[in-house]
Amino acid sequence: MRFVDEFRDAALGRAVAAEILSLVEPGRHYKVMEVCGGHTHSIYKFGVDDLLPANVELVHGPGCPVCVIPMGRVDDGIALAQLPGVIFTCFGDMMRVPGSNGSLLDAKAAGADVRMVYSPLDALRIAKESPDREVVFCAIGFETTAPSTALTLKRARAERVKNFSCICSHVTIVPPLRALLESPDLRLDGFVGPGHVATVVGARPFEFIPADYGKPLVVAGFEPLDILQAISMILRQLADGRCELENQYKRVVPYEGNPRALEALAEVFELRPHFEWRGLGFISHSGLKLAEAYADLDAERRFDVPGARVADPKACQCGEVLKGVIKPWECKVFGTACTPERPIGTCMVSSEGACAAYYNFGRFAREREVV
Amino acid sequence: MRVARVDEHTGLALCTDGAGVPHKIETALVAPLAAGERVLVHAGVAIAMLPAEVGA
């Protein structure tokens, strides 16, 4: 087994698709939200939705790290990058997210020292190699990425790297899910749960969705057969009249998560009272900041950060896309004024963004063609 | 990624991705690791072990 080919087997895919077809009630419309942007990407890359019956609709959730960053945080990053002596480091996608006056890539073009890294550990290495410069790492992402930042900060502390700091925009997935479930805009039948977040936090934190809101949730892997099987498991629960948390991604996700990762998160971070999400507004206890014990490594305390709130551009409908209220192609600027080359909204920036997934894999069709 | 070599002093491992490209990976969340084992890596950190291959 190589853990890739087996999960992309076309014959097995058709068999699971046939099983899905046998589980749906004719005349009933099913709406299933895939929470994670990684799932959205896989669904459109592999054409998973083309294998589904027309009455099974996939709704794209808020689990794309770049997509949920508000413009004000981008402006904060640019302000830090423009400080004399600062090397500003971030993941590649983040460089292209528009702020109110351009992106980090634009700031780099104008002379700021902005560098793309694959890991916060790369940023720490740059700091050790450049002791006369201040190196700031722009930390974004859900619980999947936050342990990487936590371990890097622990290393910076242990190795006494004084010229390294972090502007933290890490977020947690449960509060926005709860906000979505409380929203009157959206009626959902079930959830494909975020497999990689669950690798860290476990499947357990998602128990509240079936328990409190009566919706099945299946934690799933990211290959096409993983996603198809998860959809089949959700539909089977609905057909059987069950409502449970199930784990399709058992080969990676333990029920209790990764205890060492959870310990590192608890040591390095604490919850912010509120954090602003692009398009979703302020959500209580949904963002992480550095704990007091790590305050000296917090770029927001080391430097003067504007911290201004900036409204999304009027033309941008990322908020509705992130809440699953509209499909990407229903946005007024999708594919015209807003493209991956010149994005207006964040959902068009990251490969995990729903708009970029639709655009890059040619999913412009208003009506699905069912195989 | 597949573990090629582990540096127990630094806690970092040299791992190769599917294309054979080497990466230095933080192992603190899954250690101890041994050469040949497979790990799920996110942002430079191994966050989970992958099951052993069968019939490889």
Image: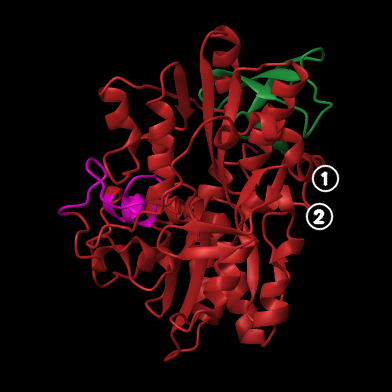
Chain colours: A red, B green
Q: State which chain disc 1 sits on.
A: A
Q: Position of residue A229 (x, y in %)?
A: 58, 63
Q: Position of residue B55 (x, y in %)?
A: 71, 34
User: Over which residues does the magenta segment extend?
Assistant: A336-359
Name the residue type under label 2.
Answer: Glu
Which residue, given by chain and number where applicable, does mark 2 sit on?
A: A256
Which residue, given by chain and number where applicable, does mark 1 sit on?
A: A259
- Label 2 SS: loop
Q: State whether residue A46 is above or below residue A116.
A: below
Marks 2,1: beta carbons within 8 A: yes
Q: Distance from label 2 to label 1 (Cα)? A: 7 Å
Q: Quadrant of residue A238?
A: bottom right
- Give whichever of A232, A40 is nearer the camera: A40
Q: Quadrant of residue A256?
A: bottom right
Q: State which chain disc 2 sits on.
A: A
- Label 1 SS: helix
Crowd band around label 2 with a 10 angstrom C-alpha radius: few (<14), some (14–19), many (20+): some
Name the residue type under label 1.
Answer: Pro
Instruction: Pick out the residue farthest to the left.
Output: A336
Q: Is residue A354 magenta?
A: yes
Quick check: can you spot residue A9?
no
B33 lies left or right of B15: right
Q: Position of residue A54 (x, y in %)?
A: 37, 77
Q: What residue is shown at x 44% (from left), y 45% (from top)?
A: A73
Q: Position of residue A193 (x, y in %)?
A: 61, 62
